[in-house]
Image (cartoon, rainbow, N blue to C red):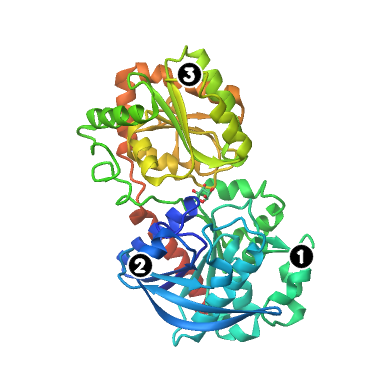
Amino acid sequence: MEIFHISAECYPVAKVGGLADVVGALPKYQNNAGHQVRVVMPCYNTKFKNENSFECVHWGHVKLGDFNFAFNVLKEVTDKLGFELYLIEIPDLFDRKDVYGYEDDIERFLTFQIATLDWINGRNELPDVINCHDHHTGLIPFMMTYCYKYYKFKNTPSMITIHNGLYQGQFGFDKLYYLPEFDLAHVRVLDWNNCINSLAVAIKCAWAVTTVSPNYLNEINISAKGLESLFNMVRYKSRGILNGIDVEVWDPAHDKMLEKNYSTADYKAGKQANKVKLCTLFNLDPTKPLFSFIGRLLEEKGGDLLPGSSAQALQENYQQINILILGSGDTEIENQLNSLRQNFEGNYNTFIGYNEELAHLIYAASDFILMPSRVEPCGLNQMYALRYGTIPIVRRTGGLKDTVIDIGDNGNGICHNQSTISDVCYSIQRAVQLYEDKEQLDSVRLKGMNTDHSWERVCQEYIETYQLIINNKNEN
Ligand code: GLC
């Protein structure tokens, strides 16, 4: 089957969060399973772009209302990612360092979507399915169905995969004229609460809707920043498919970013060697349990709970624990976290920023990983942690609930229910107790390391869902 994935992020080309990890891995496993998979994304000015070779396979012009943009489609020549990668080069809009956060993001991603469809439309063959990811590609299913110039796609199935329903890509109807021409009788399809809401439009128009975990699908039927009733209406075409992880990139036995590689046979020595290295780098004490956080410092991820719970947990334990934070986001949270360094020198530290290599070392070196998320559509960090023998401490939400079971239920981690400092600290206390019970600690760690969260298993569920909508097409 020929599959197109269209996304704003893809690791290692450009990454902000977990979306990139998924779009960098799932296609590879689909390809290995015998499908022809292509990933299309905007061409940002990233390290990957500058250090690799591309050939131009198509060029054209795209109209966005009164604006005209020239674009090129660049194909990565070595196929080193395990799938075909295409970058849509629109210099005026994407020749920038960051993926998001610009005033003209709406114009940027809409132009990207139109250019992508123009190109695929001009190819001889139509793909079997187009899998869009998140709101940045959410207008594609609409355009495929209603825009005159894309009439060829009318019978091409599209699917929207929702990695985060909090971001919806809304804009006013004053920008309606950006869209390629369509029969205005269908204009209501674009409307959600008097706005054009890219995610809502995708949910309405895509042939299938998937979320990145089954539990998140249940949750967004109850709370989804205004879209819950829509999710209820499309339940019949929705499915929650738990993300996998790329077990080639995330493998403690072969990970080149570690100080020492290890497997289930020698994980104690392996983890300790990594811990010593990390503790030296960050002035921490390798004889004490190490709790880490890796991710975006946002309320959504419970980032605002970290300063308070770190201070309280360090005090309660008379500094007999270490805490290390790696991430960036909300400046206020960053400042609060940094200001704790002075008080807890030797047991607490931060690295404000994004650093993939350091993240790998932290998974290997830590005893526990903190994920106090308010919202977590899937979460990949808990799965990386489990594979590296590091025990996740999570709030029971979204995909965290699907993947982490409390040790009280003979599980693989520590769970709490509330987004409060006291719940996080209570979990940390339980972790400290577990750390002292070496026998149980080992059995929980091994349980994690032996869990199979690979895409190999999961990727079949995507194929089944595509197959289902392709069959629907044949029946109609
Ligand atoms: C988003 C979600 C995260 C999910 C990831 C990949 O970043 O916030 O929970 O794991 O996408 O699907």
User: In the image, is residue 403 above or below residue 179?
Assistant: above
Q: How many labels were placed on the picture?
A: 3
Residue 457, quarter of picture: bottom left
Task: List the single residue furthest toward the top.
Answer: 318
Along the viewing direction, whichever of 180 and 398 lies nearer the viewer: 180
Task: List the single residue furthest toward the bottom.
Answer: 124
- Residue 437 can be seen in this image: yes
- The residue type indicated by label 2 comes to Phe
Along the viewing direction, whichever of 453 and 331 lies nearer the viewer: 331
User: In the image, is residue 380 above or below residue 65?
Assistant: above
Q: Is mark 1 within 8 Å of ligand 1?
A: no
User: In the image, is residue 374 above or below residue 17?
Assistant: above
Asked if marks 3 and 2 touch (Cβ < 8 Å), the reply is no
In terms of secondary structure, where does tag 2 sit?
loop
Percent across and percent down for residue 263 are 23, 38
- Residue 476 can be seen in this image: no
- The residue type indicated by label 3 comes to Gln
The image quadrant where one finds the N terminus is bottom left
Percent across and percent down for residue 377 are 54, 47
- Tell me the residue that label 2 is attached to: 83
In terms of secondary structure, where does tag 3 sit?
helix
Percent across and percent down for residue 253 are 24, 42
- The residue type indicated by label 1 comes to Gly
Along the viewing direction, whichever of 441 and 83 lies nearer the viewer: 83
- Tell me the residue that label 3 is attached to: 429
Task: Give the numbered dot on residue 172.
Answer: 1
Disc 1 to disc 3, how far (Cα)? Answer: 49 Å
Disc 3 to disc 2, how far (Cα)? Answer: 45 Å
For the residue carrying disc 3, how many other residues have a C-alpha within 10 Å: few (<14), some (14-19), or many (20+)?
some
Of tags 1 and 3, the one toward the viewer is: 1
